[in-house]
Image: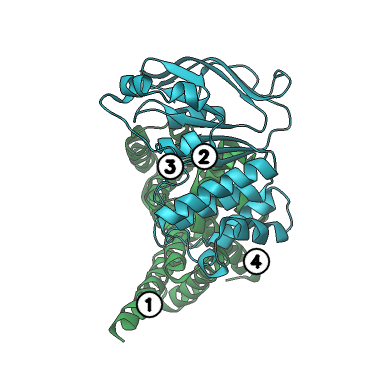
Amino acid sequence: MEDIKAAVSAGKTLEVNNLSVHLDTTRVLKDLSFSVVKGSAVAIIGPNGAGKTVLLKTLIGSLPFAGTVRWAPGVRIGYVPQKLDLERDIPITGIDFLNARAAVARKPAADISTARALVGISPEVALRSIGAMSGGQFQRLLIAFALVADPNVLLLDEPTAGVDEPGQEQLNQLVQRLQKNQNLTVLFISHDLSVVYQYADNVLCLSSEHAWFGPPSTILTPELLRQIYGGEVSFHVHDH
Amino acid sequence: MTTESLLLSVAMAIAAGLVGSFAVMRRMSLAADPLSHVALPGIGIALALHIHPVFGAVVALVFGALLVWAVEERGGATTESVIGVVFSAALAIGSIMTTGEDLIEALFGGAGALSSSEKIFGLLVASAIILFIIAFRNSLIIMMVSPDIARTAGINVKRFDLLYLESFALTIALGLRYLGVLLMGALIIIPAATGKRLAHDLKSMLWISVVLSVMSATLGSVISMHLHREAGPIIVLVATALFLLSLLPRRAWKRA
């Protein structure tokens, strides 16, 4: 395993070379190579079990791997996981959770309100137990948690899963706005190909055997999608 | 009970309330008992070597916590089986090595004057545990919600896991003279379980657990003196009574 913060090429935030990950004896990722330009948005797509979540967990250093993962110096990663197993009656409120992040990052309390307002969590909701929040509320809280520490990279594992339709649109726009305004580099896992088409500069498509990387127009072709997902996959492209 | 002994039992109870709060939130309530059992062979070895039993217990507990940590690091479903097997075996071995009065005292806690080295050691350890939990509560919360998020927040998850488990083990060591190997786990878990039922946020959780733990320890000691019984079982019964009381308001609330 190489140093995770070794030098990267100019203008790149992340370089991954020949990355292989095994969980127990099962190979999940094999010889994966790609790089991410600073300030760009990369969508990670692929069928269930292709290793999307495993890739994000490897990138944050939670899983052992072979190959190299190089982050540019000075990256501050905000990670938003997919789903957390919390007890409903856990006596930790949204505010407790955001306070904890601010305290660890030595950020002023004002940053908490800013992050909370940015993701659209009301003060009343923030006072609820994190175990009693709805899926969408908790998802927003996790994004706020990441934002408190002023990240320059966001890793989002299906950020809109469990969020209602208008909420999904809001969250997608929020992430896009943050990305543009604060020049964030964003890697996000999504199953919604229209969202991928709309927001991603590049797409990393994983399947059990291969990986493809490139702009949406070259990756999201009917042929490739059929090959990966099997059967007919259609998606609607929003015109803007 | 001397003032120093009272002070030490209050410090022990504060540490138990704080450590217990995170134990119940981390869902390791059931690990408390087996881990405390590992103290017994330590006490047995210490008695055989004619050194102070508390120090034997401390060494065994520190080692036991290290073992739990190492097994947890490897992950998988084996953790529970390993804890179940190893620590039950420890209890068996300890029971063979320790006999008669010594065994009863080790299991349920016993009277007997505390030596001054024990008091100093106890107060130092209790203060260290209390300071650790209070100072690093934010990191501990983030780790509890998600170790992955904690890593991206720059928290050394492995190190804090070990430090927390060692705090847990040392809290058990602190309570051995009062509650013994079999019951100390209960003083860590029960007040915190009550706190979890009643609290709505972290601050109230920690306060309620600490206050109830101190109440159980002091009230239990006073009652036991009047009844001329060992303190340990009475302390645990007081803690249990407080837990049962905490069940009442919600039921009454629902009926209304």
Disc number placed over residue B4 in the picture, else none:
4
Disc number placed over residue B245 in the picture, else none:
1
Residue A42 vertical placement versus B111 (above, below): above
Sequence-wise first label, 3 or 1: 3
Sequence-wise first label, 4 or 3: 4
Name the element at disc 4: helix
Q: CA distance from mark 3 to mark 1?
A: 32 Å
Q: Colour of chain A?
A: cyan
- Marks 4/1 in contact by CB < 8 Å: the verdict is no
Give the residue number, with chain letter if any, for mark 2.
A156
Q: CA distance from mark 3 to mark 2?
A: 43 Å
Name the element at disc 2: strand
Give the residue number, with chain letter if any, for mark 3.
B38
- Front label number (4 vs 3): 3
Q: Colour of chain B?
A: green
Disc number placed over residue A55 in the picture, else none:
none
